[in-house]
């Protein structure tokens, strides 16, 4: 564990070690009020084939570390993203199993009390098959929302669900996470991996992740962000694609894909790199990491792209942290297969506020709306067509009320069934460019 100043200098280092065992740190949490940090991870013993990994929470303070083991057999995946509660305890999730090959998985919500260790635990779900306990986030009612895999509680056969927990880790409700579209062979396309969550002050929830490959036109594994109401109603979605190579996998931040600047803006980061079937190392493709500044309406305010100039070099993104001064810290690892030593190297990058470049908005394609105000609808005109553009109307509460693809230079948007009032019109292109305007229905 290395503490790094805003200038990039490392000024304190603490080693996480355990006798005769390999320690793998997954997540780090600031405990606040100068009380140090929590680090979660797992220990792997020497009998690797038995998967005897032991989950741990380490309390780091004033140069000392105290370890607490939580549970027995635990798969060493990048799961269990949690948060530090108001009382200083750590709430997070983990999954365990007795036989990996059978897949009898158990998913637990955990509470770690400082200086005590495990002080509360709930097995939320037990199932045969695979899945991940993606994250725990605080809700606006002093409860907890856990993002869980399929067949959760009474939500039915959905790939992911929002499970509502009380402060004492009892289940109070459940809603399915809305699908992202139609997947391969007509199946539902849902978040598949690298899912993380961000609770907004409004009580709405942002989810980002990579979703299952679906057939044309959205090849392979694109990345998406969903904005949901506290009860799981879909308010908005934005998807990110690689437009130059359809065989590129898009992956968001594995540990933390999003981080809030303030109540209205946040940082989001994702990586795209070659994920071809075949022998390692994949194929000769470049990789890029995109860091975005976005508002909570999912408009892109700025972007920084780096590390995309080398063939056969793969950058893996771990997490993104927004700073109050407008900077963004991004962490990950890199494999350079043209180097003498291709072993992965960890890296930390700081992107200053001045380094973000405004993303070209769809308005630059020459958009216009008329009549405005209108009584039955309006014409949306594009001087230059952009591929895959979609128009979405949101009411004053942010609820998506109408959606219409834009295939022609001029499209009539029928709003006759909508009640009078103010509406936000958002046009989104496949390349992420966006145009926003207000329309008034008389």
Image: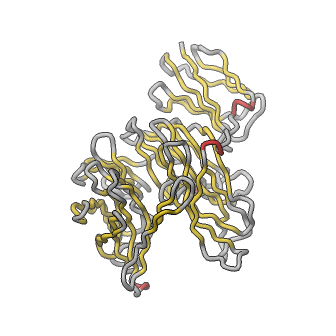
Q: In this view, does 252 lie above or below 366?
A: below
Q: Position of residue 119 (x, y in %)?
A: 21, 62
Q: In which quarter of the image is the N terminus?
A: bottom left
Q: Where is residue 147 in the image (x, y as percent from the top left)?
A: 39, 53
* Quadrant of the rendered image containing residue 102: bottom left
Q: Nearer the viewer, residue 164 or 20?
A: 20
Regarding residue 248, the answer to whether it shows in the image is yes
Q: Number of marks in the image?
A: 0
Q: In this view, does 136 lie to the left or right of 295?
A: left
Q: Where is residue 193 in the image (x, y as percent from the top left)?
A: 50, 60
- Coloration mode: secondary structure
Q: Where is residue 287 in the image (x, y as percent from the top left)?
A: 68, 61
Q: Which of 25 and 348 is in front in this view?
A: 348
Q: Is residue 165 above or below residue 388?
A: below
Residue shown at 54% from the left, 30% from the top: 402
Residue shown at 27% from the left, 59% from the top: 111
Residue that protrudes farthest toward the right in the picture: 384
* Quadrant of the rendered image containing residue 251: bottom right
Q: Is residue 242 left or right of residue 53?
A: right
């Amino acid at each position: 564990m290395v503490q790094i100043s805003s200038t990039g200098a490392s000024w304190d280092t603490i080693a996480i070690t355990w006798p005769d065992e390999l320690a793998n740190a997954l997540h780090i949490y600031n405990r606040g009020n100068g009380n140090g940090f929590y680090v979660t991870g797992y220990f792997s013993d020497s009998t690797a084939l038995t998967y005897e990994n032991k989950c741990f929470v380490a309390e780091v303070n004033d140069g000392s570390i105290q370890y607490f083991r939580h549970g027995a057999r635990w798969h060493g995946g990048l799961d269990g993203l949690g948060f530090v509660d108001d009382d200083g305890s750590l709430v997070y999730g983990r999954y365990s199993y007795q036989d990996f090959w059978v897949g009898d998985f158990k998913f637990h919500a955990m509470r770690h009390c400082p200086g005590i260790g495990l002080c509360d635990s709930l097995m939320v779900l037990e199932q045969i098959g695979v899945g991940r306990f993606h994250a725990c986030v605080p809700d606006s009612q002093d409860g907890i929302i856990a993002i869980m895999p399929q067949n959760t509680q009474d939500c039915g056969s959905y790939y992911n669900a929002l499970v509502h927990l009380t402060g004492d880790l009892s289940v109070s409700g459940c809603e399915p996470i809305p699908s992202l579209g139609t997947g391969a062979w007509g199946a539902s396309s849902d978040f598949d991996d690298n899912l993380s969550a961000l609770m907004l002050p409004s009580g709405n929830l942002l989810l980002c992740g990579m979703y299952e490959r679906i057939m044309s036109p959205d090849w392979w594994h694109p990345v998406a962000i969903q904005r949901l109401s506290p009860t799981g109603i879909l308010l908005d979605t934005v998807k990110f694609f690689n437009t130059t190579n359809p065989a590129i996998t898009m992956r968001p931040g594995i540990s933390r894909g999003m981080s809030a600047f303030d109540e209205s803006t946040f940082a989001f980061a994702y990586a795209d790199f070659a994920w071809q079937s075949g022998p390692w190392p994949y194929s000769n493709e470049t990789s890029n990491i995109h860091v975005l500044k976005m508002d909570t309406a999912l408009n892109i305010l700025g972007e920084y792209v780096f590390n995309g100039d080398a063939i056969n070099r793969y950058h893996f993104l771990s997490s993104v942290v927004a700073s109050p001064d407008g900077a963004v810290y991004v962490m990950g690892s890199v494999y350079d297969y043209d180097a003498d030593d291709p072993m992965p190297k960890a890296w930390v990058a700081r992107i200053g506020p001045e380094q973000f470049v405004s993303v070209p908005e769809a308005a630059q394609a020459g958009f216009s709306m008329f009549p405005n105000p209108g009584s039955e609808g309006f014409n949306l005109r594009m001087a230059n067509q952009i591929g895959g553009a979609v128009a979405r109307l949101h009411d004053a509460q942010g609820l998506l009320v109408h959606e219409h693809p834009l295939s022609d230079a001029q499209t009539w948007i029928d709003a006759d069934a909508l009640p009078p009032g103010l509406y936000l019109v958002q046009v989104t292109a496949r390349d992420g460019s966006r145009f926003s305007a207000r329309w008034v229905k008389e």
